[in-house]
Amino acid sequence: MMKRLPIVRISSAKARYYLLHGFKAALAVSLSYLAIHASGLSNGMMAALSALVVMQMRIADTVELSGLRLLGALVGAVVGAVSVLFVPDTPVGNLIVLFAATLLCTFIARWNPRFRMASVAAAAVILASVGHANRLAVAGYQLLEITTGVLIALGISIWLWPVRASEMLYKSLGGQCRLAAQTLDQLTIAFLDCQRHLPPAVLEPFLMAVRENHEMLSKVREHEALVYYKDHEQLGFLVQGIDLVTTHLNALFDALDDDACESGVKLIMEQEIRDLAGATSATLCHITAPASEMPWPDLGLQQRFCLTRMNELRAAGMLQRLSTDKLVQILAFYQSLLHLASTVDVLADRMVHALAKTPAS
């Protein structure tokens, strides 16, 4: 019997996202072709291909590739034009020029990766000018085609259904905060359940989600900021805060994963720890929506409750009944939870102030 092929289900939102991107790419290619074809200079192939290459889903990526394509086209056109001036238009000569120009353009990318597209333009100039009396004019036409395609694609990306990396990153960071809250809940439940060990997979969804934060933030600051002026202080706060949250969650997991502790114990401070972890999770879940109707927990108050209770237990000598290994494990988890709560409290406060300074749109 033949096996059924797996059915890939695509959400309506995702389907609409790709459909709009496909329409924008098709429009950029068509307009680039028409612009060059109407001028009668050439067939518009390089303009259409350039528009297709630089048209990306996010504006930041389109801006980055546009810069690379334009700089590469300029360098490649110059190298190609100079090459064809000194070598005869023969099969052997063109082969030598093509090899040397590609080698040179690829090699100079060693110092600056922005030159990595220069070899494409150089090859296009050399091959397109074969058999033409004025090979320098062909180089100019190729440069004009590439520039036209890039500018049309860039304009469409910016003005027609723009997809901003800053908005995608902000939404992703909100999801990461909620994932962090879920992970904290799992760690806390295991800790209060006689310090039960958890598999490393408990951290994987969160760690995978935060992997590309800095790369996307860099794209926003270096590329998207060139066409959209916006204060990205919020995003910087959130990315740094998520980094600290990641560190504290790893510390909580490491405390649970202490192999030196064989048996667990029930904690007298169970309710205080549960309340502090719950307040931290609730704050994380609402940290990207400070205007939520749900009141934010007072993390500072919960931390003071925990500290007061711990001092009472220490003064009463209740910690002396624990073995050294178990005491170290409990204090490691307790201190990591306090640090996490303090980090989230500071992050939430800074986010509120950052949003308060943002003018209403």
Image (cartoon, helix red, strand yellow):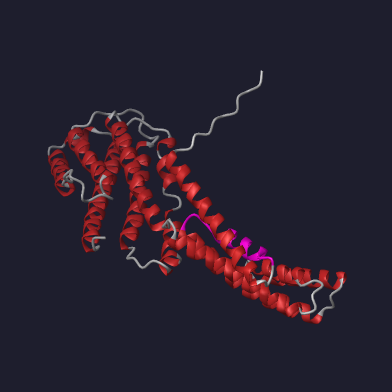
Rendered position, 353 above or below 86: above
**Is any part of residue 119 visible from this angle?**
yes
User: As drawn, is 254 to the left or to the right of 306?
Assistant: right
Q: Nearer the viewer, residue 340 or 335?
A: 340
User: As drawn, is 328 to the left or to the right of 201?
Assistant: left
Which part of the image, by quadrant, shows the C terminus?
Answer: bottom left
Q: Nearer the viewer, residue 192 or 21?
A: 21
What residue is shown at x 71% (from left), y 68% (from top)?
Answer: 124
Rendered position, 38 above or below 269: below
User: As drawn, is 305 to the left or to the right of 220?
Assistant: left
Rendered position, 298 above or below 42: above
What residue is shown at x 67% (from left), y 74% (from top)?
Answer: 141
Rendered position, 353 above or below 246: below
Residue 274: percent from the left, percent from the top? 22, 36
Residue 53 is one of the magenta-drawn residues? yes
Q: Is the stretch drawn in magenta largely helix, strand or loop?
A: helix
Residue 192: percent from the left, percent from the top? 27, 31
Residue 267: percent from the left, percent from the top? 22, 31
Q: Nearer the viewer, residue 282 or 8?
A: 8
Residue 55: percent from the left, percent from the top? 54, 59
**Is any part of residue 111 visible from this angle?**
no
Residue 221 is one of the magenta-drawn residues? no
Which part of the image, by quadrant, shows the N terminus?
Answer: top right
The quadrant holding residue 43 is bottom right
Q: Which residues are magenta?
A: 43-58
